[in-house]
Each structure stands twice: as structure tokens, then as C-alpha cells.
Image (cartoon, rainbow, N blue to C red):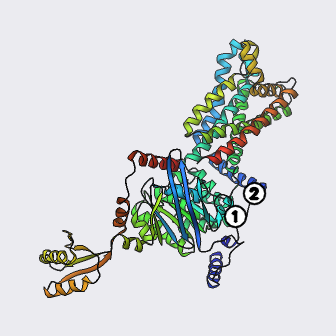
Amino acid sequence: MRGLAAGWQRAVRDLTAPPVTMGGMEDVTNAIEARGLVKRFGKTTALAGVDLTARTGTVLGLLGPNGAGKTTAVRILATLLSPDAGEARVCGYDTGRDAHQVRQLIGLTGQYASVDEGLSGTNNLIMIGRLLGIGRRETRARAAELLARFELSDAAGRRAKTYSGGMRRRLDLAASLVGRPRVLFLDEPTTGLDPHSRNEVWAMIRQMVADGTTVLLTTQYLEEADQLAHDIAVIDRGEVIATGTPDELKARAGGQVLEVTPADRADVAAVAELLETRTGGRPEISAESGTVSAAVEDGKLLPEIVRELDLRAIELAEFALRKASLDEVFLALTASRPEAAPAETAAAAAAELDRSAS
Amino acid sequence: MTAAIAPARRLGLTGGLRNSFTLTWRSLLKIPTNMEDLFSLSLTPIMYLLLFTYVFGGAISGSTHKYLQFSLPGILVLTVVLATMGTGMMLNADITTGVFDRFRSLPIARWAPLAGAILGDAIRYVISIAVTLGFGFILGFRIEANPLAAAMGCLLLLVFALAMCWFSALIGVVMRAPQAVQGFGYLLMFPIVFGSDLLVPVSSMPGWLQAFAKVNPVTYLTDAERALFIGGPAATPVIRSLLCALGIFVVFAPLAVTFYRRRT
């Protein structure tokens, strides 16, 4: 009944756009806004002026290598740390001055599953519900509902100590959802999970976004950002070095890739030669599939190539134009940056690890 | 739906107390599942009683029974005061495992996680007191004052322990790892605990140590416990103990909460 009522309320709210602002504080377009965040730990600069924006109801992917400052950014936004400079707002509330309000709107799942190992799955969730001031009976129902949703019903009465890594992570995620947060922070939610558990977590994140939650997701995995994020901010050594949708970022990294697979393996060499003369670059040949791929800058080349293939009577199994992968983008973005002194990056990475561990 | 309600601006004292009780409930749930803790909690006083009574008894008081009557109130103090170190260690474990990160991201009173853990620990001290008294009776200890006074003695121990917990909590939130809490905590606690008339009369100590022992809160508490269990003037040591407990609370509780809030 409750879900139904919530659904209706959402539907009504969506229909009566533009949404009403609440108390003049609500920023309905951007659930997360950070400007010029700076955070230093001793001599290391974890964040060197970071701007972040997450549109309400979307997933912002914060992508970067270990020690880039992702966790620090999340900890500031989740009110666990205060920045040395800059300001951050969640649903219009300042993470410093209005921390108490912010905490009522967010859910946090850390890099290391922060469940209470000595308590059962059910009691972990009941504890959170009670702390949030939800009534006894309602908390119990909510816990059961979340445990079922995260496929933990069978282990509900067992202590979290006995859970596998994937189960713990799911319980952690469930714990951050007890209060139906409007903004969810997920700090590397799938690091160290097997592919099956990872897919489950992804499905759950999609479900939450479909329900209207705004998600900030940090990840080291390009595929994860590509799969889930509406917008991506690439962060490296405490700075945002690129932002955009996954497609925009891919387009920025040098256009598109043409992939041609001849039906007959004997034609591979001929196709490669043709692509080389037409695109001017050296094509790559996959020995396994017989696919020849080459970067293309100009879309007008394609009809010519098709005509030529036809002329030579080369039969095709596949002919595809795809965008450069995020991997290619990421390498291009990070490789073009001047190297910091290795000691400094190592220290920053160590500081980051240290903080997330404590 | 909660999301449609504008968030509250602040949380009152009653809200904070409710948070603390929820977290006390959490601590209590974990006691029966933590067998190692229960074991050391009940075996430590038994070991103290056996060792001190039979090793020191004859030498100090001429007879083990006489010494037991003298030392048991002291052993109660020793057990409970040293058990408060457990609070710091458990808090530290909560911090290092990330459980406290979750608490800090919730709209709860900032002091609730500490207060809740400490209230939950009260049950641990009740266990310590019960085991010490029970085993003491088996060895031949007898309450010479009236039972009501003895009950007050137990209550006073509990009050003092709850204050000492905040000192332990401070060490717990400052130190990096639970082992460091244990090492550093005992290093601080041993001189305070043993530099008192807890196990031996102060008169046998050198002058400088007597000076320290006479102003040591542990001495006040031990004197109060002796008076309440065995007899003698109780008012002065009881009032001094309560004032010390209050002082410890007033100094260390805000410090512990401050460092806990600052810890990143």
C-alpha cells in the first residue's frame, strides 16, 4: 500500500511540473552541487578545487584511479568531512551548516561494507530504522522488504560475520536505503565483487534511479560508469579533468571506430589494405574473429568503403561503426596530463587508503 | 513518503536520548554473541580473587580470610575500573570497521553513538560485580555492613565506571587501532589503579607514593566501598567518589565527543 501511495505521490509530483520548492531551500534541478572543493591532509592535497553537479534523478559517475580523491569527495558530500575551501550542497542544503538536514536526505554505502558484524542482517536494518526515528512495526516491515529485495531473506537471522563479501555489500546497500534517501552515495559499490554479484548491484542501482533517487557513484571501472551513469566526471589527482555524458566523452576521444569482418577469412588482408588506403591509418586485425578495425574521422568515407568492398565482391559478416570505448577515452585523458612526482602520488594514494580504512 | 517532508532543522535532547537507547540495544544484543568478552569479563575477577587472596593474603594480613575482607572491595574496584578499557577498544573497533561512518551519516545526535555504547557497557560491569561478589562469597567473604549499604556500594561502582568509560572512550577515539587502545590504556591505568589503597594499606608506602595515593580517586572509591561493605564512616569517601566521577565525566565526555566528531 505504502509503495503504491508513494508511486502516486511521485506521479502527481511529476505531472505538476515545475516542482514546488520546499522552504525555499530546495534546489530541484541539481540534487548535488559542489563548487571549488579543496581538502588537504597534511602535505597531500586530496582535492584541489573540485566542481561536481548531479541532476536530480540521475546517476553521476565519479571516475578515477585509486587515490584520485573520489572517496574524499564523497565523504565531504555525505557530511563526514568538512572541506578546507569551497562549498557543497545536497538538495539545496549546505553540507556544513545544514548537515543535520542533509543527513536526513542521504544514504551512504562506503567502500568497505560498514555493517555491524555482530548483528544479524535483520537487526542491522532495524537499528538504522530506529535511529532514523521510524516506528517499530514499520521498521520491521521495511527491513523484511529490503532483505527480500536484496535476496538476503534466508540469511536474515544470521550474524553478518557469517556473510560472504557479496552478501555484506548487499546488506550495506540495503542499510543505506532504509530511510528511502533522495540522494544515495555509493563509494565503489562493486569493488571486489564477482561478476554475478556486480550485475545484481547494478540492477538494484537502476531500480533505485527508476524510483527517483539521485545517485553519486564512484568507480574505477569504466564499464560501470558507462553502464550506469548519465553524467561522468573524470577525476585524477584531486582535479576534475573531464565531464560529460558517456557518449560525449567517447566522442571527445577521437571519433569513431569502423569494424569490418569479411565472411571469408581469405579476404582479411584485402579488407585491411582497403581500410588503410582509405582512412590513412594502420588498421588493427583481430586474429581470432578476423575483424579489421580502423579509426575514422570522417563519416563520408563509409559509402566509399562499402562501394569498394562491393566492387571487389567481398562478402561481409559484419560492418559496424562504433564509438571509441571509455577505456580509450580514459587512457587518452590521463595520459595527456603531466606526471606528478611519483612520491607525491604514492603518498596521496596511501592517504586515501588510510582514510577509507579508518 | 518521507521524501515529501521537508527535513527537520535540529534534533532535541529527547531525540538524542532515543538514539542512544537504540544504540544501547545494539550493544546489549551483541553481549551474548561475544563469548570471548563474556569469558574474560567473568574469569578476570575470579583470577584476581584467587591470586591476591592466596598469594598476598598471608603476607599482608596474616590470614587469607582477614585479607579477603580487606581486599574484596578493592578487587571490585580493580575489576570494574580495568573493565572500562573495553569501552575504548570496542569504540575503536567500530570506528576502524566503518560502522561509525554510517552512524555519522545518519541524522542522529553526535554524542549518541558514544553514550549508547557506554550505557550498553553498564551491563558488563553488572556482570563483573556479580561474579566478584559471588566468587568472593564462595571463598568466605561476608558483608559486615547492612545489605542496603552494600547495594549502594554496587550502585556507586556502576556510577564511577560509567564516568571512567568516557576516559576510555577518549583513548578509543584518539588511537589508530584497538591494540594501541589496549596498550596505551593499561599503561595509564595501572599506576592509577595500583597507586591506591586498593590492595594494601597506604601506610606501608613511601611518602611520595602516599601523597599520590591519598588524592587518587581510586583510593576514595575503595574507601567508600570498604565502608559500605564492611562498615565505618562512609559519607566522606562516598561524596568524594561521586565528585571525582562527576569531574571525570565533565572533563572527558566533551573531549571524547569532540575528538570523535573531528576524527576523519
| Tag 1 secondary structure | loop
Q: Position of residue A289 (x, y in %)?
A: 21, 72
In this rendering, the answer to whether A60 lies above or below B154 is below
Within the image, what quadrant is residue B144 found in? top right
Looking at the picture, tell me which residue is in the foreground, A242 or B74: A242
Q: Nearer the viewer, residue A74 or B200?
A: A74
Report helix, strand or loop for mark 2. helix
For this rendering, which residue is in front, B238 or B168?
B168
Q: Identify the residue shown where x is 88% and y is 28%.
A: B235
Question: Is disc 2 surrounded by few (<14), some (14 to 19) or many (20+) residues within 10 Å?
Answer: some
**Residue at the limit of the structure toward the front, as seen here:** A338
Residue in the picture at 70% in, 21% down: B195
- For label 1, the residue is A134
**Alpha-carbon span between mark 1 and mark 2:** 12 Å
Q: Do we see residue A3 in this rendering?
A: yes
Left or right: residue B14 compared with residue A78: right
Quadrant assignment, res B79? top right
The subunit letter for the residue under badge 1 reads: A
Expressed as whole percent of the image width and height from the top left, the position of residue A46 reads 50, 52
Q: Could you tell me if residue A112 is visible in this image?
A: no
Is the N terminus of chain B in the top left, top right, bottom left or bottom right quadrant? bottom right
Position of residue B131 relative to residue A356, above or below, is above
Tag 2: amino acid: Gly
In the image, is B250 to the left or to the right of A353? right
Identify which residue is drawn at 54% across, 54% down: A160
Q: Residue B15 has which mark?
A: 2
Judged by depth in the image, the label closer to the viewer, 1 or 2, is 2
The answer to which of B126 and B263 lies nearer the viewer is: B263
Image x and y of residue A73, in percent: 53, 58
